[in-house]
Amino acid sequence: MTMGTKKIMAAGVLGLILFGLLGASRAADGPVKVIFDTDIMGDVDDVGAVAMLHALANRGEVEILAMGVCAKGEDSARCLDVLNTYFRRPKIMIGVNKGEGFLRDSKYNSKLVEEFPHQLKSSQDAPSAAQLYRKVLSQQADGSVVMISVGQLSNLSALLKTSGDEFSELSGIDLVKKKIKWWVCMGGRFPQGKEANIWHHAEAAVDAVKRWPTPVVFSGFEIGVKIPTGARMKSLPKSSPVRRAYQLFNGWKTRQSWDQTAVLYAVRGLDGGLDEMWGTERGECTISPDGTNQWQADHQGRHLILKEKMRSGKVVKVIDELMMELPQ
Ligand SMILES: [Ca+2]
């Protein structure tokens, strides 16, 4: 082997490693089919997570089956519609929380609805997320769907409580068990603590985490808090509602990336593609009625938590690159 050949081989290996670090396209395996449930309202990381989902869909890595809004903001669903419209996927079905849920002021929901095109005239016009998820799940192959939640667990608890209907004779729990292979949840603080997605609707969180019948991966508060992203948002075109949301939220300062970690792991991590980035620990997460959570490590547990492995700077680069996506 000549020195030149060695160099070429070394470069090839390095390229493969870098490709792996940045998340290789998994288009060859077919896109990951996801349902995305968000409380797009109080924080702006939901907007970043939606931008990432569209970027991953543009790359053939994900198919977005449906979206749902768990929070009770009047303009939250329309804001989500603004983003889907901008990314040229205006037909993504959006469900809303028709039951109890969390409400707080939003710095960007109404402004985005005022300033950018969308179809949905009112959140009242959207179907119940739990019913929408039933419809979508009933149409999918068994064990083929990944649920991503980046907000309160109101819609997921409601889904588990549903009964047989025109879409499926199965109960909510049985339908989830049959169709969903993973739930990736941004929620909780590990090994124990209090995190907003859980305690803002503790009753739903207690129910959903206790009864959810598939394996679950939690990306806890401690993962996303160390990943500041959005520094390049200002350089997006002014036509971008993602740019505008980050401007309205904090004037284009960086923001932590809790929700983006769940999207990234759900699409690129479940098959081991992000093992350099995050390890996992198996165990059992339990939620107390006051919204605090506890963690008990157990190698036979049905829950996993992400554990930081890689320096956050590299994760920031991957997330920022995807959040800077333009419509295709
Ligand atoms: Ca969120």
Image: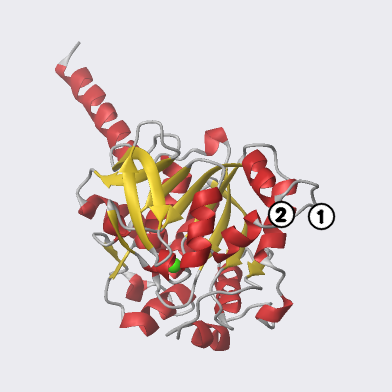
Residues under numbered marks 2 and 1 in contact, where contact means CB atoms less than 8 Å apart: yes
Which residue is at 55% across, 46% downward? 60
Q: Quadrant of ligand 1?
A: bottom left
Mark 2 vs mark 1: give the one in front: 1
Residue situated furthest right in the rendering: 166
Query: What colour scheme governs how the chains and residues are painted in the rendered image of this protein?
Result: secondary structure
Instruction: Find residue 226 and report its horizontal and vertical position in percent.
Output: 23, 59
Q: Is residue 156 left or right of residue 229?
A: right
Is residue 27 positioned above or below 104 on the image? above
Is residue 56 positioned above or below 92 on the image? above
- The quarter holding residue 291 reads bottom left
Instruction: State the mark number for residue 165.
Output: 1
Residue situated furthest top in the rendering: 1
Tally of numbered tags: 2
Which residue is at 57% across, 82% downward? 75
Q: Secondary structure at mark 2?
A: helix
> Tag 2: residue type?
Arg
Instruction: Work out how far the residue at label 2 is from the one at label 1, CA to CA, in angstroms.
Output: 9 Å
> Tag 1: residue type?
Asp
Residue situated furthest left in the rendering: 3
Which residue is at 28% across, 33% downward? 17
Instruction: Find residue 148 and report its horizontal and vertical position in percent.
Output: 51, 54
Assign the N terminus to one quadrant of the image: top left
Instruction: Find residue 281 and report its horizontal and vertical position in percent.
Output: 32, 39
Packing grade of label 2 (10 A; few <14, some 14-19, many >=20) is: many
- The quarter holding residue 320 reads bottom left
